[in-house]
């Protein structure tokens, strides 16, 4: 069997005709920047995310950057972010001139350990950036409570968790202003780069809308030193089609994860992802922790199974951040996760026999009998 880490075929084949028709209609529209597709996608995504506003932008990193920018966060300010996130969360903080302050994750959920946030709050702290990593909602009630107590803003990084919720409320709707990505491999992915900002605050929405478009609300009148970070009209047309399927694709991801959980249970050398009380998990990634992770990954490759490591180096230890002077051992939990994590294939359209084969291969590696009942 040959199982890639990710395949789009199961999602894209059934909607190919619709996508091509949307492209043709975009082509014929003669309207290629901030047209009806962007407008329609913004209202559809705001409705999906239960926020008042959604603002389409160029990608997830730019969505994070604009979000911090509209809150006035900049030089001299500190932003709290998990030590095991994807690098883009941290890059956005650096791009506005602020300093990332890293908080270790909870070892079970991989999400920021809210009980450790207060320890790092200083007079310079302006904002907390929770990241709903791998598709599981962070513990938002306690996080919001800490933010309110210290009068801090919240910018959610919702790039991996479209449709996830905590205590029934959707991720991307808790923070003052929130960012998401529609990078192709995300749960809702464009056919290229794309992202969005979500908020319920009309002033922040107006400013974000202006900043993505040269700091202008009215053509050739510029209120801010803005960017060109617009959502592409053509990607918006594709996203409108794909958005209709996200709920069904999420159910499929959850079904695959449940099967993995069943077939991989009881292997002493492997720990499986868990879902926190109150949280839902939309399984952007299915990440296990394994002993002899590198050898397991190589073994699976010989069996034709594609896997990835999310992520091999925690952001504070990346070369790009050497000026922060962190060293190995400063983030023991993030480092342990980086050394033991392995992401298994999961995508809508994946066959259950493929999950079976992957689980059997992992059991074989650890000399464990098949988990099938
Ligand atoms: C993908 C991702 C981003 C960045 O999104 P891009 O669209 O690739 O710029 C930011 N944060 C997290 C957690 C991500 O997974």
Image (cartoon, helix red, strand yellow):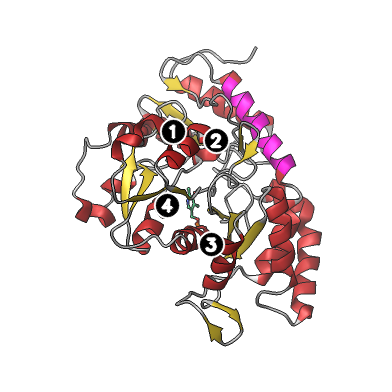
Q: Is mark 3 within 8 Å of ligand 1?
A: yes
- Which residue occupies 69% across, 55% down? 45
Place residue 365 in its image quadrant.
Answer: top left
- Characterize the magenta stretch by its predominant secondary structure: helix
| In the displayed structure image, the side of residue 86 where residue 175 appears, left or right | right
Residue named by callout 2: 136
- Which residue occupies 57% across, 65% down? 57
Residue 216 visible, this orientation = yes
- Quarter of the image that includes the N terminus: top right
Q: Is residue 256 magenta?
A: yes
Q: Is mark 4 within 8 Å of ligand 1?
A: yes
Q: What label does residue 59 carry, if any?
A: 3
Disc 4 secondary structure class = helix
Q: Are marks 4 and 1 in contact (CB under 8 Å)?
A: no
Sequence-first disc among 2 and 1: 1
Q: Are marks 3 and 4 in contact (CB under 8 Å)?
A: no
Label 2, label 3: how many angstroms apart (C-alpha)?
Answer: 21 Å
Sequence-first disc among 4 and 2: 4
- What residue span does the magenta drawing correspond to? 247-261
Residue named by callout 1: 110
């Amino acid at each position: 069997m040959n199982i890639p880490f990710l395949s789009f075929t199961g999602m894209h084949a059934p909607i190919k005709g619709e996508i091509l028709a949307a492209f043709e209609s975009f082509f014929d529209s003669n309207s290629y920047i901030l047209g009806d597709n962007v407008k329609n996608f913004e209202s559809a995504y705001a409705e999906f995310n239960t926020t008042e506003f959604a603002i389409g932008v160029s990608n997830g990193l730019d969505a994070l950057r604009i979000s911090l920018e509209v809150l006035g966060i900049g030089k001299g300010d500190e932003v709290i972010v998990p030590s095991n996130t994807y690098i883009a969360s941290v890059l956005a903080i650096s791009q506005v001139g602020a300093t990332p302050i890293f908080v270790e994750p909870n070892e079970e959920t991989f999400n920021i350990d809210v009980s450790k946030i207060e320890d790092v709050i200083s007079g310079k702290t302006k904002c907390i950036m929770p990241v709903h990593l791998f598709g599981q909602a962070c513990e938002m009630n306690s996080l919001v409570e800490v933010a309110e107590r210290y009068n801090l803003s919240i910018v959610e990084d919702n790039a991996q968790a479209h449709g996830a919720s905590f205590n029934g409320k959707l991720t991307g709707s808790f923070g003052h202003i929130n960012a998401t990505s529609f990078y192709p491999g995300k749960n809702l992915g464009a056919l290229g780069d794309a992202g969005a900002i979500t908020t319920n605050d009309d002033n922040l929405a107006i400013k974000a809308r202006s900043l993505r478009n040269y700091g202008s609300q009215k053509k050739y009148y510029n209120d801010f030193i803005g960017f060109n970070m617009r959502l592409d009209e053509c990607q918006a047309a594709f996203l409108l089609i794909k958005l209709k399927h996200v709920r069904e694709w999420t159910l499929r991801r959850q079904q695959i994860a449940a099967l993995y959980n069943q077939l991989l249970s009881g292997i002493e050398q492997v720990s499986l992802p868990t879902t926190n009380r109150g949280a839902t998990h939309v399984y952007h990634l299915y990440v296990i922790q394994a002993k002899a992770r590198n050898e397991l990954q190589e073994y699976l490759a010989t069996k034709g199974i594609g896997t990835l490591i999310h992520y091999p180096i925690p952001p504070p230890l990346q070369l790009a951040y050497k000026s922060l002077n962190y060293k190995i051992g400063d983030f023991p939990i993030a480092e342990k996760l980086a050394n033991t994590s392995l992401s298994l294939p999961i995508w809508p359209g994946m066959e259950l026999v493929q999950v079976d084969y992957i689980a059997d291969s992992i059991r074989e590696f650890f000399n464990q009998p098949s988990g099938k009942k």
